[in-house]
Amino acid sequence: MERVLVIDDDVALCELLTEFLAPEGFQAESAHDGEKGLERACNGDYDLIVLDVMLPGINGFEVLRQLRTKAGTPVVMLTARGEEVDRIVGLEIGADDYLPKPFNPRELVARMRAILRRTRQEREQAVPPSMSKMLRVGNVEIDMGARLVFRSGERIDLTSVEFNLLGILLSRAGQLIPREELIKTVLGRSPYPYDRSLDVHISKLRKKLGHNMSGVERIKTIRNVGYLYALAPASDTTEKA
């Protein structure tokens, strides 16, 4: 069974989720304030964490911020319905996905399974650095096997989602990639109405890599369609095994 930590001060909700998740193949434990939740998240061997934004003590954002300095455990954040700012901030700090309250437990399970499926695929696809494929477009180089990214020779730290997103964009540089395809491939789920998750991850990539490449917009937004990573001059674009 997958081990899940639910950090939420709503005791009744935690009990409900524990009962609901068990038949779905999840062993759920709970913590009801930020300090205890952070301690258990850092010291426990959990496959996934469900984290509420509003917590007594330190809030969910600070829990996530501190957790990301110590562990990469996947996190689904619970936010108040309509609080789009909370969702964007959570994704920027390092959440893998978010779900507004109140929510259907079945949707939470679907999100959890999508994230865990993606993380399992990443582990299975990992290969020794000596066998890795290198991609280079302009001043950005990515080692698909070692999961390393460099810009002008300087290493850039990316989250797992950002790395996977960049890998797809670079491998198909110059091609328009539909939003729906990116969401399904990178986030492991289908898009839903008013979904801003992909846009936030793209925005974070732009900040880390630089908005422009040789005077050209690096990642172009094709409104209501998708995204395109600009082609560098032919001499600056290489791929090797």
Image: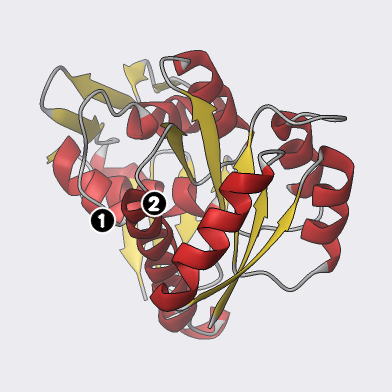
- The amino acid type of the residue labelled 1 equals Thr
Q: Amino acid at mark 2?
A: Pro
Given residues 198 and 6, the one toward you in this image is 6
Q: How is the image coloured?
A: secondary structure
Q: Nearer the viewer, residue 13 or 62?
A: 13
Q: Is residue 169 visible?
A: yes
Residue 40's place in the image compared with 52, above or below, is: below
Which residue is located at x 38 percent, y 33 percent? Answer: 197
155 relative to 169 in the view: left or right: right
Residue denoted by label 1: 185
Q: Is residue 69 visible?
A: no
Distance CA(mark 1)–CA(mark 2): 23 Å
Label 2 secondary element: helix
Q: Residue 105 shows which numbered tag?
A: 2
x, y percent for residue 106: 32, 55
Corner quadrant of residue 177: top left
